[in-house]
Image (cartoon, grey):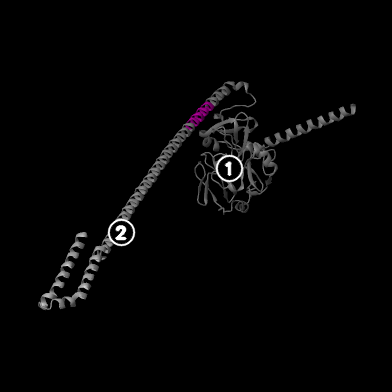
């Protein structure tokens, strides 16, 4: 039991000693900031950055600058993009003050003030560290005391990761991966140690142009950095990047206007309670205004969605009414076609019936006429009978003719011969009349 207690005591002592050593090492790095802080003339930045933020004293760092931006501001992430220049990957900020804080000095995050900028005298295209993998490219701002030799202990929440093909986008912030996934991505990425050296100054230049071209499947043109004569945001025109790069003095002069900076000592919070209350009330009012703007925006979005939904419903109702009208028109047309078809069919049937009736009537008339003609052409029985009788008489008369000649020898021949002929003619005429009367 005593042995276990001794071992545990030794482990606790080792942990405490290592923690103290690490704390002293980090503090020495921050205090031995490689930008030679005491020799920097802040006047170059003071006049140019004063309209856009607040200068204050921040512990051992001295004069620092706090930008007047939204709460979601992140250096090298908000309102800017990357461009490949003759110095490597250069951050092109859209802020009017972006010429200084993104190319000189370091950024540090304070839990109370947010992001603050510590001035420096060495210009670089961007003071960031880079990481990469087969899928992502990432960067994070270097803090105080960090350089190409010391760039560890960057918190995962300060990294920005995007898919590699979007690194050249003008709106690269749209493709940031959620910051809650940064730890997982960091564990699957490696550091990019491409270093650019100029005038004994070294900084990370980022991934090579060929590697990015393979990721984007497009050609990346190199732009040339030129000096601008005015303190304004960078201008990117075709293959020229105009950047304001002032010369920072190194003679150790004190700033004549540095006493104008508002002094707020972090170590003495009790003496600045009123200022903090004022800032907190201002922050609260800004938050309230932001909340009100968000509510108005959400209300506007709801109204827009409601109007869109009502318009969609109205459009759907109109389309439904139109479909119903078209269906009714189609049904009426079908009924009309069916009715017309029935009428036409009845008319055709009626015409066919009439035609058949006319044909039948004509046939009957023709048959009757033929029957009548046949009846007329065929002699009747009475006519045949009279003809037979007349022929019999004529035959009998012919047979009796010599007898009459012999008996009437005394009379003249002409009178005896003419009688039979007159009788036969008379009988024939009578038979003809009787047949006509029968007819």
- Residue topped by disc 2: 363
Residue 222 position in % (x across, y down): 56, 52
Residue occupying the point 68% across, 40% down: 184
The part of the chain drawn in magenta is 286-300
Placement of 102 over or under 382, stated as above or below: above
- Residue topped by disc 1: 175
Q: Nearer the viewer, mark 2 or mark 1?
A: 2
Magenta portion: prevailing SS class? helix
Query: Is any atom of residue 426 visible in this view?
Result: yes
Query: Is any atom of residue 150 visible in this view?
Result: no
Q: Quadrant of the C terminus?
A: bottom left
Judged from the image, the secondary structure of the residue bearing numbered disc 1 is: helix
Q: Quadrant of the N terminus?
A: top right
Q: Is the residue marked by circle 1 packed among few (<14), some (14-19), or many (20+) residues within 10 Å?
A: some
Label 2 to label 1, Cα distance in Å? 98 Å
Residue 287 in magenta? yes
Residue 406 position in % (x across, y down): 16, 78
Q: Tell me if 115 is positioned left or right of 349 in this view.
A: right
């Amino acid at each position: 039991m005593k042995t276990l207690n001794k071992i545990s005591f030794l482990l606790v002592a080792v942990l405490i000693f290592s923690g103290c050593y690490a704390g002293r090492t980090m503090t020495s790095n921050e205090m031995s900031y490689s930008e030679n802080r005491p020799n920097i003339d802040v006047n170059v930045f003071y006049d140019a950055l004063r309209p856009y933020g607040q200068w204050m004293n921040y512990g051992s760092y001295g004069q620092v600058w706090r930008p007047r931006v939204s709460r979601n501001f992140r250096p090298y992430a908000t309102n800017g993009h990357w461009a490949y220049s003759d110095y490597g990957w250069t951050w092109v900020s859209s802020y009017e003050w972006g010429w200084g804080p993104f190319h000189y000095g370091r950024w540090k995050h304070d839990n109370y003030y947010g992001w603050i900028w510590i001035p420096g005298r060495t210009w670089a295209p961007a003071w960031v560290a880079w990481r990469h993998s087969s899928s992502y490219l990432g960067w994070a701002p270097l803090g105080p005391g960090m350089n190409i030799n010391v760039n560890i202990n960057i918190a995962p929440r300060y990294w920005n990761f995007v898919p590699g093909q979007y690194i050249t986008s003008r709106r690269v912030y749209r493709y940031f991966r959620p910051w809650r996934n940064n730890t997982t991505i960091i564990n699957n990425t490696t550091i990019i140690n491409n270093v650019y050296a100029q005038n004994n100054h070294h900084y990370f230049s980022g991934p090579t142009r060929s590697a990015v071209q393979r990721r984007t499947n497009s050609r990346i043109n190199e732009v040339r950095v030129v000096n601008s004569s005015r303190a304004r945001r960078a201008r990117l025109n075709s293959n020229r990047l105009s950047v304001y790069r002032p010369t920072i003095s190194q003679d150790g002069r004190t700033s004549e206007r540095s006493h104008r900076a508002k002094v707020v000592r972090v170590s003495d919070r009790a003496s600045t309670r009123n200022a903090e209350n004022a800032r907190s009330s201002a922050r609260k009012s800004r938050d309230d205004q932001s909340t009100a703007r968000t509510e108005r925006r959400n209300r506007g979005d709801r109204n827009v969605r409601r109007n869109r939904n009502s318009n969609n419903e109205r459009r759907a109702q109109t389309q439904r009414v139109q479909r119903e009208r078209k269906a009714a028109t189609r049904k009426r047309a079908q009924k009309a076609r069916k009715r017309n078809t029935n009428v036409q069919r009845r008319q055709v049937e009626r015409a066919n019936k009439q035609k058949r009736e006319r044909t039948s009537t004509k046939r009957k008339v023709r048959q009757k006429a033929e029957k009548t003609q046949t009846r007329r052409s065929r002699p009747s029985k009475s006519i045949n009978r009279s003809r037979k009788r007349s022929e019999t008489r004529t035959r009998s008369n012919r047979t009796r003719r010599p007898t009459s000649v012999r008996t009437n020898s005394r009379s003249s021949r002409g009178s005896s011969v003419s009688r039979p002929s007159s009788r036969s003619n008379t009988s024939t005429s009578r038979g003809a009349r009787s047949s006509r009367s029968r007819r």
